């Protein structure tokens, strides 16, 4: 490792500690990885509620990944199915999900978030476990397919349904078999059956109280397993996932797929990921305060896990702080 790299890591860690000291964050778990090394760090406290306020963040604690689920689980498995010839990026979604009504929307357009589908499921305020899938299929495009970027949870819920249909098993089973198992990610799951004190709390909500050990995202909460959100994981596993990309591990994809991910750019997106930090970079965030930034040009990764929505999502200081951290990382 170069002195410059070590200096960057130290500066970023000092900045994270300052975010804790100023109350922007309760605490954090983060990692800086290269092909040769991994540096993992934890800081601060689990939360502000009485039962969390004086508990330090420890290694191995579980975070609600929120939309990191989209790349860690859903996009990973869809791209594997493409490589296996079970579908293609040009396959119309309707060819697999017969209830879907829009033949112009393809698997690739869902991955790129340019399908034109509405960002949210229709009638979000009145969703129930009984009607949510009907509402997913009722959600319609609000702009022409391929005409621009529109981030859509609906699209990734549909990708999750495609995986379930083709693999003939639950998302949990599919991801464990094809993604998490091969990468030895033993702490990543939709299930939250470990001791509750190992879960980092998220938002305090009027309808659910302080959410901890349950998925924060409302749609994933109703669905049980969703292609859009719902996975929980620990820093060690997220670092292992990032390492698979840095090493171009064939346990995940072939070299050709990694190359395709690095070269595709549609309205600033590649398959599942944002490439807003330039060619050869992959980036994704989760609403709860999680993110992963991969610089595949220099084979470096920055993983950040926080509960920035605790106790409330009204936390503008975090979003600005994360931009600063990413800028430090990219140099």
Image (cartoon, rainbow, N blue to C red):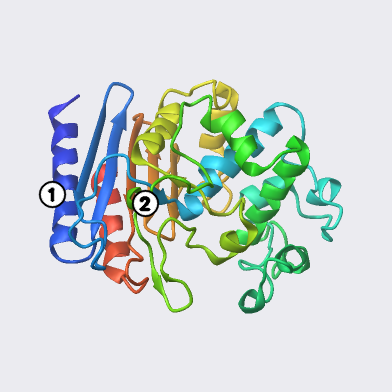
Q: Left or right: where does residue 306 sit relative to residue 190? A: left
Residue 151 appearing in the image: no
Q: Is residue 124 visible?
A: yes
Question: Residue, x 73% and y 35% (percent of image)?
Answer: 167
Q: Residue furthest front?
A: 195
**Residue at screen point 51% across, 51% down:** 268
Which is nearer the eye, 326 or 305? 305
According to the picture, the residue beneath numbered tag 2 turns out to be 199
Quadrant hosting residue 313: bottom left
Left or right: 212 in relation to 90: left
Q: Which is more toward the observer, 225 or 268?
A: 225
Q: Position of residue 320 (x, y in %)?
A: 28, 63
Taking the image as shown, residue 195 lies to the left or right of residue 48, namely: right
Q: Is residue 202 above or below residue 171?
A: below
Above or below, 14 against 212 in this view is above
Q: Name the residue that disc number 1 marks.
A: 14
Question: Please, what secondary structure does the residue beneath circle 1 have?
Answer: helix
- Quadrant (top left, top right, bottom left, bottom right) of the N terminus: top left
- Few, some or many residues within 10 Å of mark 2 (<14, 14–19, 20+): many
Q: Using a 10 Å C-alpha cutoff, classify the residue at mark 1 as few (fewer than 14 neighbours), some (14 to 19) or many (20 or more).
A: few
Residue 21 percent coordinates (x, y): 13, 61
Mark 1 / mark 2, whichever is N-terminal: 1
Instruction: Give left or right: position of 73 versus 126.
Output: left
Point out the frontmost of discs 1 and 2: 2
Up the image or down, 244 lies above or below 292; here it is above
Q: Secondary structure at mark 2?
A: loop
Q: Nearer the viewer, residue 34 or 203?
A: 203
Q: Residue at x 55, y 66 (%)?
A: 218
| Residue 84, label in figure | none
Q: Position of residue 199 (x, y in %)?
A: 36, 51
């Amino acid at each position: 490792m170069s002195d410059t790299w070590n200096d960057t890591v130290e500066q970023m860690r000092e900045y994270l500690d300052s975010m804790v000291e100023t109350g922007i964050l309760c605490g954090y778990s983060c990692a800086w990885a290269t092909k040769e090394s991994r540096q993992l760090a934890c800081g601060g406290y689990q939360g502000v509620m009485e039962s969390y306020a004086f508990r330090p963040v420890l290694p191995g604690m579980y975070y609600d990944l929120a939309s990191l689920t989209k790349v860690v689980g859903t996009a990973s498995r869809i791209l594997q199915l493409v490589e296996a010839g079970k579908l293609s990026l040009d396959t119309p979604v309707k060819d697999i999900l017969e209830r879907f009504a829009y033949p112009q929307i393809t698997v690739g357009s869902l991955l790129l978030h340019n399908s034109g589908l509405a960002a949210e499921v229709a009638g979000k305020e009145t969703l129930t476990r009984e009607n949510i899938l009907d509402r997913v299929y009722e959600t319609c495009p609000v702009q022409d397919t391929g005409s621009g970027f529109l981030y859509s949870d609906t699209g990734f819920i549909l990708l999750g349904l495609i995986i379930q249909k083709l693999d003939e098993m639950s998302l949990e089973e599919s991801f464990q078999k094809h993604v998490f198992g091969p990468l030895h990610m033993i702490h990543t799951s939709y299930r939250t059956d470990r001791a509750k004190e190992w879960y980092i709390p998220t938002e305090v909500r009027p309808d659910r109280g302080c959410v901890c050990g349950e998925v924060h995202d409302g749609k994933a909460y109703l669905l049980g397993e969703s292609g859009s959100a719902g996975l929980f994981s620990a820093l060690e596993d997220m670092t292992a996932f990032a390492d698979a990309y840095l090493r171009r591990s064939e346990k995940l994809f072939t070299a050709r797929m990694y190359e395709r991910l690095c070269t595709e750019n549609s309205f600033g997106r590649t398959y599942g990921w944002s490439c807003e930090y330039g060619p050869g970079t992959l980036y994704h965030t989760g609403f709860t305060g999680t993110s992963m930034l991969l610089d595949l040009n220099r084979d470096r990764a920055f993983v950040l896990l926080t509960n920035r929505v605790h106790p409330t999502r009204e936390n503008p200081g975090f979003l600005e702080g994360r931009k600063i951290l990413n800028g430090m990382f990219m140099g």
